[in-house]
Amino acid sequence: MHKIPIIAVFLIFGCTTALADDAATEGSIPYDRFEESSVCADCHVGLTVQYEHSLMAQSFIHEWDEKEYFELALPHAEKFAKVAGVKAGCNGCHAPLAYLAGDIPPEHPEAGTRANEGVSCDICHSITGFSGETPFNFNYVMAPGETKQGTRPGRESDHHGIAVNDFLKTAEFCGICHNEQDPFGMWVKSTHLEWKEGPYGQAGITCQQCHMPAADGALVEDGDVVPGARQHTFAGVHFPQMVAGAVQVLLYPREDDVSPGQTMTIDAVLMNTKAGHMIPSGSAEERVAWLDVKAVDSAGKQWHLAVDRKGFEGEDLTIADPNALAYQDIADIQGLDDFAGLSRDGDVPAGDRIFRKPYLDPQGRMTVAQWNTAAFGPDYRLPPLKGIKESFTWHLPADVAPGPVEIQAAVYMTMVVSSVADFMKLPATESEPMPMGQATVAFMVK
């Protein structure tokens, strides 16, 4: 379900907006047309508690989002015309109340404005569709007011009317903000598009089925039990319990018995079995996912194993190198002198395989400024339900102890590469490795 535009789509930053006759645009709807989420909490107590713990509620006040906007995006927008639209455009999804009210740029979170409400309850429950053929870059169509958009027929409320709108059940509803095209025409966020092209989309398993699980329960305090009520958890990468077990890892030594001084190969087969989109997805420019493999002999001595190269174009960007630098465009944005860049891979051990899609700035350097992405490196991420094979060739040292040697493999992910997190003074939680999958296997040393 969507509306057909009659006016062209124009780039406005690392977002675009569809300037159609029915599109909600900057400054088109004042703050007071939307209820505060605290009003919703009076009746929808349990659902509101879930929502308040989500990044939907914190999309403007979350530490990294705040710093990214005020210390990177906003100063960049004021210096370079190409990305000038980022000043308003970030807020189309991160602070939609401020964007729609024309409160641009919003004040910092400590000012306590309504921008702090992030993606509020009334934002989502006022969306009736989207403009154009593809949901992206906040091309939502809004109908705020006394009637709220919902999905269940036959429901009544003493506070507001309810319009049954099946659009809220669709993945396209999520794609409005979880697809993004930047001023260079690059799809810098494509979670909905990845879903649509993958097995989950083909099977009709929507975003809501994972991120808003259905559970029997009341929609309002002391209300009747509703079967399969959508929970407003919106759990994603910031929830370790969602990340845990997302990647299946299987290990296969090619030899069962070896001797010191011999060379052997261990194969690892990985599969994204939990996410209906790529891993990592969303803000993939700042995420780091990697495979780490160690060998531990019977005496407890450890060796770190480096991944075998496959030889594809741009592969160097997918193998951790402690000497590689990136993110030099931070100097352009912040006006820094003598800034060589930051560690490209942060704390990822040298030689580990990184599953990433490098975002490259106009000078060909890796960037975490998604709106400044002019090209991509190789898309070497983990697609849903598709195996990826990695190999590790190991020349056993002479001092390896006889007996069983255990190969330990683990996949980790951080929300922000540690070097950037340290430079931007982010909380440790943003760069702590979260385990996504692990496996062990043993072979014998004679």
Image (cartoon, rainbow, N blue to C red):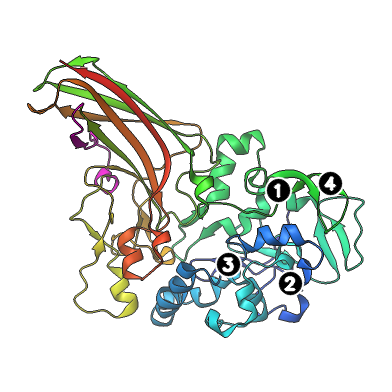
Mark nearer the N terminus (3 vs 1): 3
Which structural element holds mark 4?
Answer: strand
* Nearest-to-viewer mark from 1 and 2: 2
Q: Looking at numbered disc 3 in the image, what kind of residue is underneath it?
A: Gln
Task: Name the kind of residue labelled 4 in the image.
Answer: Val
Left or right, 220 with respect to 182, comes to right
| Residue to which mark 1 is pinned | 170
In this rendering, the answer to whether 324 lies above or below 16 is: above
Mark number displayed over residue 38: 2
Residue at disc 2, secondary structure: helix
Residue type, numbered disc 2: Ser
Identify the image quadrant of residue 392: top left
Q: Position of residue 307 (x, y in %)?
A: 24, 36
Check residue 49 for magenta coloring. Answer: no
Residue 30: tell me if it is visible. Answer: no
Residue segment shown in magenta: 298-318
How far is the residue under mark 2 from the one under mark 4? Answer: 23 Å
